[in-house]
Amino acid sequence: MTNVAVDEETLKKIIPHECPICNWPGIQTIIGWTQVHERRNRFRVLENFIVVATICENCQELCTYELPILPDETIGSAYRIIPVSSKTIDFPENVTKISERFVDVYNQASKAEEINLNEIAGMGYRKALEILVIDYLLNEKKVDKKTAEKMPLSQLIDKIGNSRISNIAKASAWIGNDESHYFRSNPKYGIKDLKTWIKAFVYYIEMNLSMDEASKLVDGNK
């Protein structure tokens, strides 16, 4: 068992400065922490950790975090263990309309990432991307369902029709593939980049759908 010293001032620097329940950006109040515990992880390696309880001064909700004790006897980054936030990520209405399944799968991946399941979160984001690409192409009538079923994602992405956006979608797919395999082809990039590029693709779709709607109005009044 480690003899690492734990004090409130150190913990305040580690606990996230945003309530995971109401998103209030104030410092969460620490109401207590456990002594250092030890256990063996799934690889049978002995590890030490503490659990810290906090309360939000805005919504008065309780939250707990697990903090690992590192080999050099410092305290590592916190990750929340309870509760799992019910917050969902909203997307533009016109994007949601053409692909509710994308929104659902993206939020599932986000929940996995939120509870530190990073090994499967990336695969979820990759699946969300594929769903969005196909639903967008079907909505724009650039492919039919029968064609989409047989065509690889890379070829479907080429049908988007904008080379810069196609590159964003391809880059997202490549990083998503890395999240599904043992070895990474692009080790400099990760989930953060994947999410950024998916959001860029979402903005492109939103812009195009909005322009299509505006064109209908203008054409209808000529």
Image (spheres, grey):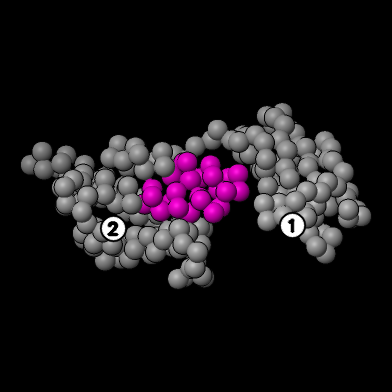
Quick one: 166 or 111, which is closer to the camera?
Answer: 111
Pick out the residue farthest to the front.
Answer: 44
Corner quadrant of residue 71? bottom right
Q: What kind of residue is marked 2?
A: Leu
| 33 horizontally vs 86: left or right | right
116 magenta-colored: yes
Instruction: Say whether marks 1 and 2 touch (CB < 8 Å).
Output: no
Quick one: 37 or 50, which is closer to the camera?
Answer: 37
Q: Residue at 15%, 41% (x, y): give it.
A: 216
Q: CA distance from mark 1 to mark 2?
A: 40 Å
Q: Can see residue 194?
A: no
Q: What kind of residue is marked 1?
A: Val
195 magenta-colored: no
The C terminus appears in which quarter of the rendering?
A: top left
Q: Position of residue 126 (x, y in %)?
A: 41, 53
Crowdedness near tag 2: few (<14), some (14–19) or many (≥20) residues, C-alpha within 10 Å: some
Name the chief secondary structure element in magenta. helix
In this picture, is 130 found above or below 28? below
Q: Position of residue 89 (x, y in %)?
A: 47, 40
Give the mark toward the camera: 1 or 2: 1
Q: Residue at 51%, 58% (x, y): give it.
A: 192
Q: Earlier in the sequence, mark 1 or mark 2?
A: 1
| 122 horizontally vs 27: left or right | left
Q: Can see residue 144?
A: yes
Crowdedness near tag 1: few (<14), some (14–19) or many (≥20) residues, C-alpha within 10 Å: few
Q: Which mark is residue 9?
A: none
Quick one: 194 or 81, which is closer to the camera?
Answer: 81
- Looking at the rendering, the stretch of residues picked out in magenta corresponds to 106-129
Task: Look at mark 2 in the image and give the residue it sits on.
Answer: 153
Q: Residue at 38%, 50% (x, y): give it.
A: 127
Task: Look at mark 1 in the image and give the residue it sits on.
Answer: 45
Could you tell me which secondary element the residue under label 2 belongs to? helix
